[in-house]
Structure formats: structure tokens, C-alpha cells
Image (cartoon, helix red, strand yellow):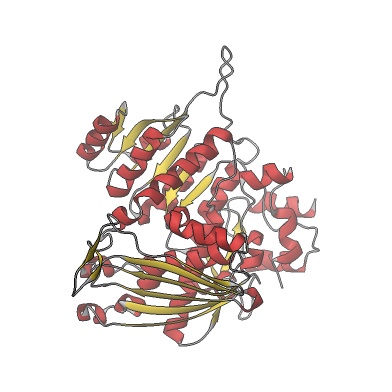
Amino acid sequence: SYCAIIFASVKMVRFSFALVSVFVAASASVSAFAPSSFSSTRQTLALRMSIDTGAKEPVKVGVIGCGRIGIVHLGAINKAPGVRPIVVSNPTVSKAENAAKTFGVPKFTSDAMEVIEDPEVDAVWICSPSQFHADQIKACAANGKHVFCEKPIATDLAETVEAINACNEAGVKLMIGLQRRFDPNFLRVKKAIEDKEVGDPIIIKTCSRDPSPPPYEYVKGGGGIFNDMAVHDLDMTRFLAGEDPMEILAVGSCHIDKSIEDLPGSEAFDTATCIVRYPGGVNAMVDVCRQSSYGYDQRAEVLGSKGMIATDNVYPNTAKIYRNDFTGNADMPFDFFLSRYFEAYVTETEAFCESLVNDSEVPCTGVDGLVALVMSIAADKSAAENRWVKFSEVIEQVYCSSPTECSLLANSDMFPDGFKPASGIAEIGNIVVPDVDQKKEKGEKGSFMDKVMKGIWS
């Protein structure tokens, strides 16, 4: 075909503007992307069946990163039915060795690639520092491994899309760790909305306030308060609303740690507030602060047309003190995120294990992680420019010459002024390949080339 001829001559080469112009002028039936070279050869990892007993063999997993989060996930994996950890890694190999001994894991290493390339491993948990996530996800996809990755997929939007598409093209499952979605308190609020216990949602509120501010070194280079803190709350508003957001207004300030005021952008904020608009006139309000004098403050509230539901903080116990000068909880709320969300971390790990064992749908997808990043970037932009920002303004900056070759138009001199792929959150599928569960559900076997020209260019 005309498209195939073009791609045969430019395989593995960056598109020129002239070639892009050809695609813009082409008919809607012409594909904008070359077929993936490995999508046809890498099939979804099917769980093997024992010939003798008919029982499923255990899913063998590896864990990259044996820090605090890695240990929590490893402990949950060790208890989940049908799943067995067989190798762990950490750059400080003594940590990997200690984790292996603690949880009875037969192999340990200092090299993450040894986990990814281990022929016995079916799935990999990525619990390494954020800057390694995208490359490790892509390596897992290239080696046919299912992936659980702590958020973020990447701090760069284009690289996030590339990593998601690498998994989706390879036919492997990708789950992102947004653990609050698995917290029983927030899940109860979600159930109340779905069951119409409080009627139709009108206002959604969340707050996140840490017990004490992080060190200056943590804040510096961390991407700012919207990226490293508010992103969880922004994702929670979308989870509760059950809709894709439209636009956001965000403001920030510094009240607690004046030493960070010299940092750029939202890194100089220790306090921030966001308003997110959803379809149907639903508004969500988020407030975050890096210090709370009374412990870890994590609450949600939904006002509906027939009532309201709200969560309280989580305490180490239910004991209360009653005196003539005080009535209340005997102890403060949990003061550390691992204590507060330990059950949620375990539950999300078990959920992915169940998805692997039963080949069922992943409950928190790569797109969920992508949209959370889009929301945090838009919040940052809103605070910097002091205006409402539509989420489409962020998404339309991503241009993909192939599913796994993406860039930001703002960083490219390839396009003339005004040339942008048009896309909003609702049309994010135009730049993301359908994942393995979507393909299975819809019986879809083609790539996303066929649908791209139908809606991505304006």
C-alpha cells in the first residue's frame, strides 16, 4: 500500500516534516504509524497448565528494589496464592540478600536486568527510584514480562506514553501503583457513589497533609508539590468521579519551610489548592500541605444530591480518652505513609497477582498512571500561569511518530507554528495502544494505526 511503501523507506529513521505533511494530507484510512516489529511475535504470557493435574503453575515473579516499598510488596507477593517470588535485586546487594533470606527467595542480585532477563520470571515488580522506571518497563516489555510499577511511569509525558505502548504492543500486562485506590476508606466512598447512596455527586473534596516537611534535598529536583504529592489526590478525584476531568485551577504558596522558596516553580510551594472541573458540573477540590501538626491527614468527602459521605483519618487503635479537659482519640493518627497505607499496598499487590493468576483485567492501568501525570502537569501549569488550564493543552503536546517513539512538540522544531495533534483525555486512546485486556475483551487484533487517522489530527 501507499503507507507501507513510505514506511519501508524510513524504518527506524526520525520522520521529517515533509513526511508528516504527507500523513496530514492522507485519507483517514491511511495508517500514521508503522506496524510494531515485535507485536506479532510477542504474545500475552499465558499461565501454563500442568499436564498431570490440570492445575495452574505458580506465577514466578521478580522484584526490583528492596527499599521500603519493595519490601512491602515482596511481603504481600509471598502471601498471595498462586504467585511465587524467585529473584530480587537491589544496587546495594546486601539489601537484596537480606530480603531474599527474610522471604525465602532463592535468588538475589545487584543487577535489575538479571531479574528482567531471567527466563523463569513471568512478571516483574518495579520498586526502584522513579528515574529508572520507564527504561525498566520497556526492558520488561522487550523480554515479555508482565509489569507492576510504582508511580510514576516516568516524569516525562512522552516517555510515559512510550513505556505504556511498549507493554501494550508486546501484549504484557502493566499495572501502576496508585495505592489509595485500594484503601478501604476511599473504596467505601467509591461504593457509595456507585450505589447512589448519596445521590448524584455534586462536590468532591480530598486533603493530604503530611506530618512534617521532607528535607530540602528531597524537594529539590522532585518536580514540585503537584507532581510528588498532589498527584495522588488528583487521581483520587478522578477515581471517585468516575469521569475524565476537563480543566483545573491551581495555586500554591510557602508557609512551613522557607528554605525552599529559592527553588523553581512549584518546588517552592509547601501548600497548594486545586479545583478540578468534571462533566455534569461536578467540581473537585484538593488541598495539600507538607506539614500537619496532628499527624498524617488523609481524608475524602463527597456531597451528593441525597446526602454526604466522608472518611476520617486512620489511627493506630480505637482507644479514646475522656477527661474534664479533653475527649478524643488516645493517640494521634498514623504519622508515616507506609503505616497509613500498608493495607492498601498489600491489597494492590494481591490485586495484580490475581490478575496474573486468572488472566483478568488489571485494576489500575498504564492510562490511569498517564492521566494522573497529565493532571499534575496541568496543575503546575495553572499555578505558574495563574489561569484555568484544560487538560487537552497538556495532552496535545505529545506527538508519536510510532507507538514507542514519542516527543513533546514544545521540544521540537519539526513542526510549524500552530501544528498540533488535537487530543483530550477522552481521546487519549489516539496515542496509546490498546492494552492486552482491552484487546482480549474486544477481540481486537490490529494495532492502533487504523484508528489514529480517524481522530488524532485536526
Tell me which corner region of the image, top left, top right, bottom left or bottom right, holds residue 98. top left
Q: Is residue 171 above or below residue 134?
A: above
Instruction: Out of 117 and 122, give the one closest to the viewer.
Output: 122
In percent of the image, x 58 and y 68: which residue is there?
198
Residue 149 is situated, as x and y percent measured from the top left of the image, at: 43, 49
Q: Nearer the viewer, residue 245 or 447?
A: 245
Residue 86 position in % (x across, y down): 37, 29
In this rendering, position of residue 177 left or right of residue 216:
right
Image quadrant where residue 212 sits? bottom left
Query: What's the residue at 50%, 87% (across, down)?
Result: 387
Name the quadrant of the C terminus.
Answer: bottom right
Taking the spot 60% from the left edge, 81% from the top edge, the residue there is 417
Q: Name the residue at 69% across, 53% down.
A: 448
Q: How many marks?
A: 0
Q: Is residue 380 above or below residue 2?
A: below
Residue 290 appears in the rendering: yes
Q: Is residue 433 left or right of residue 263?
A: right
**Residue 406 found in image quarter:** bottom right
Q: Is residue 36 visible?
A: no
Image side of residue 98 versus residue 340, left or right: left
Rendered location of residue 184, percent (x, y):
45, 54
Residue 444 image point, x, y percent: 73, 45
